[in-house]
Structure formats: C-alpha cells, structure tokens
Amino acid sequence: MTAKIIDGKAISEVFRAEYKVRVDRLIERGVKPGLAVIIVGDDAASQVYVRNKARACEAIGMHSEVHALPADTSQEDLLTWVNNLNANSAIHGILVQLPLPKHMDDRAVIEAIYPMKDVDGFHYANMGALVIDESWFPPCTPFGVMQMLAHEGVEIEGKHAVVIGRSNIVGKPQAMLLLKAGATVTVCHSKTKDLKKFTRDADILVAAIGCANMVTGDMVKPGAVVIDVGINRLPTGKLCGDVDFESAKLVAAAITPVPGGVGPMTITMLLGNTLRAAERAAGMAKSAGFTMMA
Ligand code: NDP
C-alpha cells in the first residue's frame, strides 16, 4: 500500500479563495482586515516566516504591516508597540513572532495582546476558551491540522488519535481539538515509555516533536492517517518532518509531506483568524465561537 499524500498547499488554496470572497465583502463595507506582525531581532528563519505571512495577507487583499524591532529593544518598548496596536482600529490581528530574545518574557508580551486581536490564539483567555470549546482563535497549526482532516473526510469520532508532543502551541491544543471532535486522545512526550506501543495503536497519528525522521514506518499502524507537523533542517539544508516519509507512506493510508503539508495550513489559519477578527469588529461574525469550517 502507498499512502495518499495530503496536499496542504492545495487545501490551503481552497480556503484562501473562500477567504478572498469574504475579504472583498468586508472591503465593500469599508473594513479592510489588517494584521500586524512584530518581530524582534534578526533570526533568519523567523524573518522568512514573517515575510510569508505578510505576503499571504496581501495576496487575498488584506492589509499587513511588519514591525521589525532591533534585538536590544526593551520589553517596555515592545509592550508600548503592542498597546498601540491594540488601540489601532485598522488592525484586527496582532502577532508577536516567537521566540523573543532571552531578555524578554514571552508570556507577559502575549498577555498584553488584546484577546480579540490575539490571532495566534496563545493568550490565556483564548487557550482557556479552547478548553471549553469556545475559542475565537484556535492556535493556527493544530487548527490547520483539523481543517486538513475535515477536508480529506477523515473520520475522527471514536478513533484513537495519538499526539506526540505536548507544547502549548501545538501538542496540547491539538489534543484538545481532537478531543472536541470525538477522538480518544493519547498525548505522548519525551518521558513516554515505549512510544511505539502507543503510535502503533493510533488511527490518527500527529507528530509535533522537532526531531528529524523520528517516526518510522514500523511505528505506524497499517491504514493510519499520519500528520507530520515537524519542520527540521538537515545538514544538507533540506527540510524534513518528524516522520520518516519514505517508510511511513508504505504503511499509512494517508500522510502529509514536509514541506507542503501542515506548514501552508498554519499560515492559512492565521488569515482565517484575522478575517474572523475583522468580521467580528464589523458586526458580521456568525457565532460566538468557531466552527470547523469558518
Ligand atoms: P517543542 O520543542 O515546544 O515541543 C516538542 C515536544 O516533543 C515536547 O512536548 C517534547 O516532550 C516532545 N518530544 C521531544 N523529544 C521526544 C521524543 N524523543 N519522544 C517523544 N516526544 C518527544 O516544539 P513545538 O511543539 O513548538 O514544535 C514541534 C515541531 O513542529 C517542530 O519541528 C517545529 O518546528 C514544528 N512546527 C511546525 C509548524 C508548522 O507550521 N508546520 C508550526 C509550529 C511548530 P517534553 O514536553 O517532554 O519535552
């Protein structure tokens, strides 16, 4: 068996086309959705991510602005930037690119973002709301995974989903979203004993580890759906995921590639969250919480 390749780029295009229609509708009403990204320092990978986010916004007609601050910016100055953007009605979403330089307190900065502009979904208010199924802004990467599964018609209810990784930005919210969708969820991490015992039992396996090619084909249940969140750079400069794609694709029913899988969906969900923030500000939002396809 060779797995179906889940094409995150193609699925993203479907969402972005729908978002563009909604952006045009907002612009007709005089509201241009706006995303502000703050980046501190000169980390090369972060700069690429930020550029890609800004381009994606502009491609669907949204306003985007990037504020690149020097690495020695004080936390107080950064908080002033955040507060000014909180008060700016042309900005509907604020994202502070992580990680911040060591002299800054990431958590304090995230908590300074107005929760209704926290399009990354990392503020306590949004994380807490996620736990009780009412989040406006589910974190972009796990939300993107859920949208991919929905788009591919993957049945989740009653299935065993195994998430490897328990970070606040991927593993934990991923587990919450799978739980909400009716899966029985197991979360594995670096202290898990006999990881393979769990992964071999997963109908849906999500790897969010940060360890190149760690999940090999023999760790995958035949017929499973494998979602690879990892982004790792090999010494050759090539990108790869946490899953050994070549061996896993021979066992799985469906699998995401790296690049071209979860990555594009993460940016797409950021656009969706910003759009939803603007629709809310314009009084056009559909409901208090999110729906899987909104
Ligand atoms: P973190 O480093 O914050 O978390 C990694 C998790 O993996 C931790 O919970 C850790 O366990 C667990 N882990 C580490 N080693 C093992 C092991 N040997 N066995 C089992 N579990 C292990 O990473 P992130 O969650 O931020 O990111 C994970 C990956 O996803 C990275 O490659 C990152 O680049 C990528 N990423 C991709 C995105 C995308 O858009 N595609 C977006 C965000 C991240 P413990 O908690 O015990 O330390």
Image: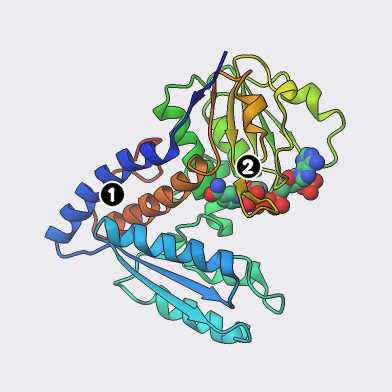
**Which residue occupies the foreground of this view, 234 or 174?**
234
The kind of residue tagged 2 is Gly
What residue is rendered at 62% in x and 32% in y?
Answer: 245
Q: Which residue is denoted by mark 2 in the rendering? A: 241
Mark 2 or mark 1, earlier in chain: 2
178 left or right, relative to 60:
right
Q: x%, y% of residue 177?
A: 55, 36
What residue is rendered at 70% in x and 54% in y?
Answer: 235
State the quadrant of the N terminus. top right
**Which residue occupies the foreground of this view, 33 or 196?**
196
Q: x%, y% of residue 16?
A: 30, 46
Q: Which residue is denoted by mark 1 in the rendering? A: 285
State the quadrant of the C terminus. top left
Q: x%, y% of residue 274?
A: 36, 57
**Which residue occupies the foreground of this view, 50 or 167?**
50
Give the image quarter of residue 278. bottom left
Mark 2, ligand 1, within 8 Å: the answer is yes
Please determine whether, in this image, residue 183 is positioned above or below residue 283. Answer: above
Label 1 element class: loop
The kind of residue tagged 1 is Ala
Mark 2 burial class by Cα count in 10 Å: few <14, some 14-19, many 20+: many
